[in-house]
Image (cartoon, helix red, strand yellow):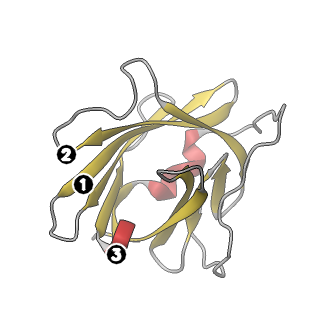
């Protein structure tokens, strides 16, 4: 089980898989602490939500919602954490507010597991880790409109 423990803030939250990386053994049961609904500050300080359902078979299903400053939907993500070849992969697709997809019909983003411990799961370019009491930090490396790669960090609190 991934327990969300307090962890000091770090300058770089994400890691990138080296070429030829073999993902370590892991199961979705190790991510049980991610289950539930989360709310926090997202892009531009606007509200963001993330929700994770209990695993069905060997897959957890999640959603992410990024709002605008006006409280409207900017975009959403449909996410899977799936067991594959004895390890974990996060796969996701982005959607605009009108449900048009960012990725092509048969394409999605895929993040293989790099490492997992008691308080964090590091996927290539994507991190989930505990952030104090009832908190979760999610960080992702992405390319902006240009070629610059930047890291987005979302700090969530569990909704009760």
**Residue 131 higher or lower than 125, as above or below:** below
**Gap in Å between the C-alphas at discs 3 and 1?**
13 Å
Residue under the point 44% across and 37% down: 92
Quadrant where the N terminus is found in the figure: bottom right
Residue under the point 37% across and 66% down: 43
According to the image, label 1 marks what residue? 74
According to the image, label 3 marks what residue? 45
Q: Nearer the viewer, residue 3 or 69?
A: 69
The x, y position of residue 75, in whole percent, is 28, 49
Verify CB contact (< 8 Å) between mark 2 and mark 1: yes
Residue 99: which quarter of the image? top left
Residue under the point 60% across and 74% down: 5
Q: Nearer the viewer, residue 40 or 51?
A: 40
Verify CB contact (< 8 Å) between mark 3 and mark 1: no
The x, y position of residue 26, in whole percent, is 68, 40
**Gap in Å between the C-alphas at discs 3 and 2?**
18 Å
Label at residue 97: 2
In the image, farthest residue toward the top = 106
Please report whichever mark, 3 or 1, sits nearer to the chain's N-terminal start: 3
Q: Nearer the viewer, residue 55 or 98?
A: 98
Quadrant where the C terminus is found in the figure: bottom left
Callout 3 environment at 10 Å: few (<14), some (14 to 19), or many (20+)?
A: few
The x, y position of residue 104, in whole percent, is 39, 23
Please report whichever mark, 3 or 2, sits nearer to the chain's N-terminal start: 3
Please report whichever mark, 2 or 1, sits nearer to the chain's N-terminal start: 1
């Amino acid at each position: 089980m991934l327990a969300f423990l307090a962890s000091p803030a770090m300058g770089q939250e994400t890691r990138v898989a080296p070429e030829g990386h073999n993902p370590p053994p892991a199961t979705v049961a190790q991510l049980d602490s991610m289950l539930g609904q989360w709310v926090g500050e997202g892009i531009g300080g606007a509200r963001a939500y993330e929700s994770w359902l209990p695993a069905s078979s060997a897959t957890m299903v999640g959603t992410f919602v990024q709002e605008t400053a006006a409280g409207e939907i900017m975009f959403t993500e449909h996410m899977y954490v799936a067991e594959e070849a004895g390890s974990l992969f996060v796969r996701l697709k982005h959607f605009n507010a009108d449900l048009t997809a960012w990725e092509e019909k048969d394409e999605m983003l895929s993040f293989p597991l790099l490492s997992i411990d008691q308080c964090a799961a590091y996927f290539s370019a994507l991190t989930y880790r505990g952030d104090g009491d009832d908190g979760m930090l999610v960080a992702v490396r992405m390319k902006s409109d240009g070629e610059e790669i930047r890291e987005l960090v979302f700090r969530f609190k569990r909704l009760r």
